[in-house]
Image (tube, rainbow, N blue to C red):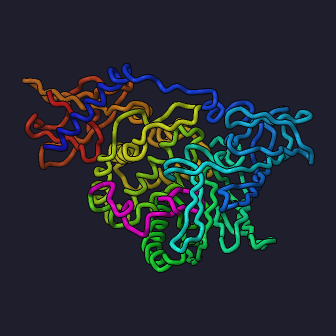
C-alpha cells in the first residue's frame, strides 16, 4: 500500500534524524535581547498587570503613531525597578508616576523604570508611558508582525495590526510576556476624518475631535493577551446579528468594506452560527460573551484577535479557495472563520505562558477544524480530514520550542498536534460523549488562564487515570514518529514493540486481520505477543488512519 510505505519511510527517517541529523545542525544562538523579550524575570514578576488604557493616535499620511499607555498593577513584592517592553524604533518620550517624570533606561527592546521610593508588596498603583514614532511595517502579515498600511478599492486608507510571535511591543508599550494577562483594558484609537477604528471588546463611545478626527473607545472586560490587542482602521460598514448560545444572547458584529457587504452577509451567515454551535458543543460556552463576537475584514489573511477576529479570506471557502487537507471536506466551509474563531477557546481563553508552548493554541485549534467537520458531515468525514492534514507535516523539529527566549517550536504544532489529539481519542477515549466531556472540562478547568504544557498533560493524566506524559513527550519534544516494529516468529504469535525516542513510551494500538474488526492491544518498548488470533504478515493491518505512526514488519 502506497501510503503505508510512505508512513514507514517518513517515520524511520524521523526516528534517525534526532540521533544523527541534529549533530550536524548548529544549535540556535540566543542573545540577551532574546532573553529580555522571552524570560519571565524578577523585573517582570514584581508587578501583576490589572488594567491598561492604551490611547493611540494614528497618522496615516506619515505611517506614524503617538500616544500613551497607562499601566495599573499590583506589586507582588517590594521593588524599585521594573521592566516593560517597546521596540527600540519607537521613542519613549516620558514615563510618569504620580504626576512626575521618573527615570528610565533602554536595552534592546526592553525599558527599565526606576521609581523614587520602594513600591511595597500589595500596593495598587499605576504609571503611564508616553511614546511615538513610525512602527515597523509587516512585510507579510500575519506571518510577520507590525502594521499594514494599504488602501481599499476606492483609494481610502486601510490599516491593521498583527503581531503574534514578534510581540505587541512592536507597536505599543506593554509587559510583553504571555504569562501575565491584563484583567481588563480600554483601547482608545484616534483616526482621521472619514475612517473608523474597530478594536477588541465593545464600543463604549465615539468622540469627535477638532480637525475632523474621531476617537473610538473600546473596552475589553475579560482578560486579554497582548498579541490579541488590535486596531483595524478603514471606511468600514457595519451589520449585526445575534446567536442564542449556551450562556444566552451573544452579539455578532461584522465590520467590512462597503463594496463587500453582500458577500460578507452571505459568507458570514453560512459559517458563523454553525461554527459557534459546533465549538460550544465541543469546548463549552464561547469564552467572551461580555465582549461579544466580531469579524473584521482586514488586508491580511486573518488572526485570532480576541472578540475581534481578523478576516481576510476573500469570502471564499477553504483556505483562500484551497483545501489544506486535499480531501474535499476543507472546501465546504470558510477556513479562516472556523480556525481563527477556534482560537477564542485555545489561545485566547487558554493562553500558553511561554510562546514555546504555542502548541496549546495551534494543536487544539487545528483539531477544532476536524471537530467542526464532524459536527457538520459526520465522524468519517472528520477522520478523513485529519488524515489529510498529514500532508502538511514536516517532522523537522520538536513542536515545543526553547523556553525563555520568545521562540516557538516547529510548525508541526498545527497538523501533527491535531493528529496527536485524534490519536489520543482513538486510543484512550473511544466514547464520544466522554471525549466531549474531557474537552469541555479542559476549557472549564483553565478558563481565562495562562497555562503550561505540564498543566495540560497533567489534566489528561488525571482525567484518564494513567500517565500519558511519554506519549505527549514523544510527539511534542521529538521530531520523529514512534515506529511500531512487528516480528513474526516461526512458532507462536507475532510480537510487537515501539521504537521511540521517549523513555517509557507506551501506546495501545488498533490491529486487525484484513477486512475484520480492529482490536486494541497494549504495546510498549519491549517486545510482547499480540493477543489477536490468526494475525500473519500478509493479513495484518495497523490502524494508520487514526494512528500517526510508522510501521516496520520484520
Magenta-span inclusion, residue 321: yes
Q: Total of numbered circles in the picture?
A: 0
Quarter of the figure that contains the N terminus: top left
The answer to which image quadrant residue 319 occupies is: bottom left
- Give whichever of 468, 92 is nearer the camera: 92
- Give whichever of 305, 425 is nearer the camera: 305
Judge left or right: residue 452 versus residue 96: left
The residue positioned 22% from the left and 29% from the top of the image is 485
Magenta segment, principal secondary structure? loop
The residue positioned 30% from the left and 28% from the top of the image is 15
The residue positioned 48% from the left and 77% from the top of the image is 265
Quarter of the figure that contains the C terminus: top left
- Give whichever of 98, 122 is nearer the camera: 98
The residue positioned 80% from the left and 43% from the top of the image is 74
> Is 164 situated above or below 522?
below
Which residue is situated farthest in the bottom direction here? Answer: 262
In this orientation, does residue 495 appear? Answer: yes
Position in image of residue 142 (x %, y %): 51, 52
Position in image of residue 116 (x %, y %): 91, 35
Judge left or right: residue 171 versus residue 452: right
The answer to which image quadrant residue 432 occupies is: bottom left
Magenta-span inclusion, residue 41: no
In this orientation, does residue 252 appear? Answer: no
Position in image of residue 306 (x %, y %): 59, 58
Judge left or right: residue 474 versus residue 204: left
Residue range of the region highlighted in magenta in the rendering: 299-326
- Give whichever of 43, 384 is nearer the camera: 43
> Is 129 situated above or below 241?
above
Amino acid at each position: 500500500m502506497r501510503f503505508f510505505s510512505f508512513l514507514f519511510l517518513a517515520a524511520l527517517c524521523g526516528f534517525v534524524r534526532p540521533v544523527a541529523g541534529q549533530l550536524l545542525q548548529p544549535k540556535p544562538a540566543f542573545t540577551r535581547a532574546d532573553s529580555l523579550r522571552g524570560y519571565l524575570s524578577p523585573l517582570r514578576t514584581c508587578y501583576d498587570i490589572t488594567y491598561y488604557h492604551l490611547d493611540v493616535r494614528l497618522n496615516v499620511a506619515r505611517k506614524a503613531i503617538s500616544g500613551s499607555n497607562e499601566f495599573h498593577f499590583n506589586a507582588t513584592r517590594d521593588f524599585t525597578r521594573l521592566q516593560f517592553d517597546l521596540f527600540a524604533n519607537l521613542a519613549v518620550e516620558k514615563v510618569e508616576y504620580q504626576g512626575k517624570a521618573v527615570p528610565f533606561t533602554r536595552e534592546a527592546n526592553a525599558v527599565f523604570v526606576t521609581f523614587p521610593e520602594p513600591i511595597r508588596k500589595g500596593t495598587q498603583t499605576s504609571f503611564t508611558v508616553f511614546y511615538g514614532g513610525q512602527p515597523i511595517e509587516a512585510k507579510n502579515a500575519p506571518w510577520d508582525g507590525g502594521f499594514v498600511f494599504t488602501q481599499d478599492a476606492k483609494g481610502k486608507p486601510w490599516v491593521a495590526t498583527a503581531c503574534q510571535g514578534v510581540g505587541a511591543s512592536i507597536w505599543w508599550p506593554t509587559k510583553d510576556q504571555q504569562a501575565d494577562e491584563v484583567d481588563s483594558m480600554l483601547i482608545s484609537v484616534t483616526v482621521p476624518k472619514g475612517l473608523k477604528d474597530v478594536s477588541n471588546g465593545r464600543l463604549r463611545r465615539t468622540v469627535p475631535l477638532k480637525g475632523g478626527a474621531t476617537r473610538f473607545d473600546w473596552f475589553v472586560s475579560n482578560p486579554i493577551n497582548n498579541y490579541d490587542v488590535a486596531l483595524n482602521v478603514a471606511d468600514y460598514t457595519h451589520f449585526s446579528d445575534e446567536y442564542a448560545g449556551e450562556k444566552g444572547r451573544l452579539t455578532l458584529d461584522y465590520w467590512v468594506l462597503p463594496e463587500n457587504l453582500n458577500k460578507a452577509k452571505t459568507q458570514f451567515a453560512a459559517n458563523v452560527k454553525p461554527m459557534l454551535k459546533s465549538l460550544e458543543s465541543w469546548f463549552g460556552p464561547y469564552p467572551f460573551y461580555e465582549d461579544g463576537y466580531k469579524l473584521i475584514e482586514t488586508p491580511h489573511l486573518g488572526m485570532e484577535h480576541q472578540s475581534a477576529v481578523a478576516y481576510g479570506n476573500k469570502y471564499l471557502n477553504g483556505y483562500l479557495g484551497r483545501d489544506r487537507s486535499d480531501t474535499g471536506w476543507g472546501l465546504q466551509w470558510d477556513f479562516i472563520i472556523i480556525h481563527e474563531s477556534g482560537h477564542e477557546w485555545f489561545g485566547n481563553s487558554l493562553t500558553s505562558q511561554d510562546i514555546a508552548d504555542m502548541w496549546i493554541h495551534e494543536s487544539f485549534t487545528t483539531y477544532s477544524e476536524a471537530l467542526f467537520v464532524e459536527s457538520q458531515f459526520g465522524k468519517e468525514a472528520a477522520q478523513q480530514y485529519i488524515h489529510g492534514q498529514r500532508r502538511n507535516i514536516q517532522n523537522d523539529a520538536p513542536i515545543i520550542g526553547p523556553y525563555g527566549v520568545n521562540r516557538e517550536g516547529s510548525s508541526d504544532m498545527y497538523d501533527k498536534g491535531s493528529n496527536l489529539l485524534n490519536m489520543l481519542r482513538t486510543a484512550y477515549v473511544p466514547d464520544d460523549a466522554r471525549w466531549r466531556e474531557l474537552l469541555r472540562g479542559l476549557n472549564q478547568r483553565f478558563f481565562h488562564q495562562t497555562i503550561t504544557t505540564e498543566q495540560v498533560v497533567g489534566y489528561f493524566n488525571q482525567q484518564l487515570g494513567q500517565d500519558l506524559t511519554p506519549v505527549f513527550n514523544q510527539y511534542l519534544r521529538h521530531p520523529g514518529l514512534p515506529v511500531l516494529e512487528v516480528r513474526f516468529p516461526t512458532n507462536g504469535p507475532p510480537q510487537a514493540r515501539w521504537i521511540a525516542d521517549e523513555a517509557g513510551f507506551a501506546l495501545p494500538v488498533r490491529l486487525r486481520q484484513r477486512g475484520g474488526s480492529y482490536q486494541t492491544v497494549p504495546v510498549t518498548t519491549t517486545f510482547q505477543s499480540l493477543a489477536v488470533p490468526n494475525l500473519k504478515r500478509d493479513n495484518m493491518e495497523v490502524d494508520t488512519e487514526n494512528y500517526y505512526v510508522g510501521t516496520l514488519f520484520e
